[in-house]
Image (spheres, rainbow, N blue to C red):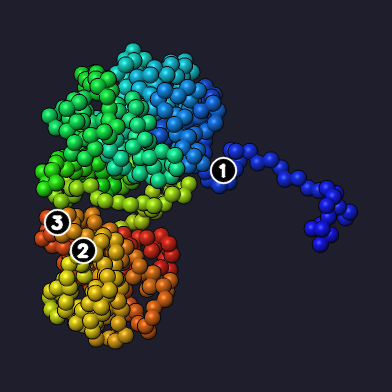
Amino acid sequence: MLALKSTSSTIDGFTEHFRGKVGEAERNAILKLDGGQFITAEPSGKRPIVILLPGIMGSNLTKDDNLVWINYLRFLSGELRHISINATGVDTPSIIKTSYQKLGESLQGEYDVVAFPFDWRLPLEQMAAKFDKKIKELLKLNQPIKIVGHSMGGVLVRDFMVYHPATWKALNESRDFRLLFLGSPLGGSFRIINVLFGEDDIISKISKLDIIHSKKELLKIFSQFPRLLRLLPFTKDADNNFSNQAVWKKLADAFGDTEWPLPTDADTTSFKTYRDKVLSATIDYTNAVYIAGQDKHTPCGCRIDDTIRGPELVLLSTAEGDQSVTWESGIPKSMIDAGTVYYANHSHGALSNAPALFNAIKEILAKGKTNLLNKNRPVVRGDQKVFKKPETSDFDLSPEGIENTLLGISEKSQIATNALPLKVKVSHGDLKYVSHPLLAGHFKNDSILYAESRVDNLLAGLLQERHKLGLYPGYIGTYEILLTLTEDFPGAIIIGMGDPDTLTAFELTRSVEQAAAKYLLIVNGREKLKSTYLFKDPIGISSLIIGCGYGGLSIESSASAILQGVINANAKISSLYGENGKTISES
């Protein structure tokens, strides 16, 4: 009370203690407000050298020594304008720690690691000249040189080969030289189309966070980055020739906004010159290896559909890619023919960040090959080769969530498939006698019909009650779990399936995954039940063949999508609870 009542700056019996000043870098590290900086020392000249080149947006950008990219608070306050293409005082002091430190430190036991940050806004021809200078310096040390280029970093190396052939020849012929591409879009990426039309998670998240700029205003900044435009697909067919202004005008019309910020005439002319130079070059990939990743959906093209509302731009995806780069556009045919391409079950950002890949990377750098990865291109079902881009919404605007989206980093753990066995049996009969809660689907704005009506009867009208109250699943990702008090019928899990004409295997998997994950939370006692329902071992789910015949889904596609959703839910629960977590073992 004495301290509270005192009006003096000093109080008898009390000692003053001053809090030390916390610098911006320390504060950001504590609060995870930036991706951190990975900086390497100059090589000693006594050990082999690995040059580590980051992907697009993988180099930190500063403006007058203040970190802007990646910096959460500066995103929030609209300071991305400070790294517009015309901004001065922009520097690249480091590569982003979150994405590259683990790999860098793993390699430091055997190599002097040299990080090569570069300004990913500028034309790679300029950065290739900077890289040429660095290579000339390192060659003088007379030590073996290895290069790891992730994403755009690999494209920079390729451009160095094209624009500086003499230095490239000397490097390629040097002792024990190796080059490793990690998911590099060497023939461009259709993801850039998604970015430029604001239909990519990167732009969507930044626009939600930035309280100053709209999405269109942010795209005016990003669409002016020459390096971003250099990553456009190298395709030349009439509908996908991105050096042609008429193609962009047609896409903008179909997008529904003719004022949308798109590449200018100068931009497309510059891209054409760059593309044609690269395509006409003879590139020697003799000492190069490519690791391709895999993800559920990767942008692979676009089309214009005629609808009752007029032309409509439809963005397309494929499962034959790593989330950012398709195998078709990323991997040079000469490397496929030479057998120097490996495939890994990791998404684009994880190719440089997943410890499970580090031993394979080390073997490739040392020997030019590895037995730890598969050379066989993964087989993809017909309906997964090309499909409409799934509608996804990620509202995680935390610093970590923003960073993971920008860098393509997934928090999902890799779980061996055989660690989570799933027994499947097919039967025909009355739904009353199912062994486990029954999984059924419901389309948006549909009535309760057919098999779903029988389930409603078994549940004494519970489904109709919820449907009449507007509390029933319909949209993708929505669900209702109803477990009974009796042993006559174990209950139902109803999932939303969206619109019948647009249902895809990916969306079906997502709805099943979310409902199954919630069911497993109940099974594991993490969600309270209003009934005294007793779960019996083995834990299982019974399921109808959901969505078959809608959106082009075959019986095989439907069954596979359902099982994949259950497997995904099992993996999440196992990641959360470890060996003690109860998972679905019967379906």
Report the Cα–Cα distance between label 3 and label 2: 11 Å
Residue 498 pos. (x, y %): 22, 60
* Residue farthest to the right, as pictured: 12
Q: Which type of secondary structure does the marked residue at label 2 adopt?
A: loop
Q: Amino acid at mark 2?
A: Lys
- Residue at image position (33%, 52%) is 393
Q: Is residue 90 visible?
A: yes
Ranked by sequence position, the earlier of labels 2 and 1 is 1
Image vertical order of residue 414 relative to residue 74, above or below: below
Residue 150 falls in image quadrant:
top left
Q: Amino acid at mark 3?
A: Asp
Ranked by sequence position, the earlier of labels 3 and 1 is 1
* Residue farthest to the top, as pictured: 166
Q: Quadrant of the N terminus?
A: bottom right
Residue 451 pos. (x, y %): 15, 74
Report the Cα–Cα distance between label 2 and label 1: 45 Å
| Residue identifier under label 1 | 29
| Residue identifier under label 3 | 501
- Residue at image position (19%, 65%) is 445
Residue 130 numbered tag: none
| Residue identifier under label 2 | 444
- Residue at image position (35%, 44%) is 204
Image vertical order of residue 176 relative to residue 376, above or below: above
- Residue at image position (10%, 43%) is 306
How crowded pointer 2 is (Cα within 10 Å; few <14, some 14-19, many 20+) is rated as some
Residue 581 falls in image quadrant:
bottom left
Report the Cα–Cα distance between label 3 and label 1: 48 Å
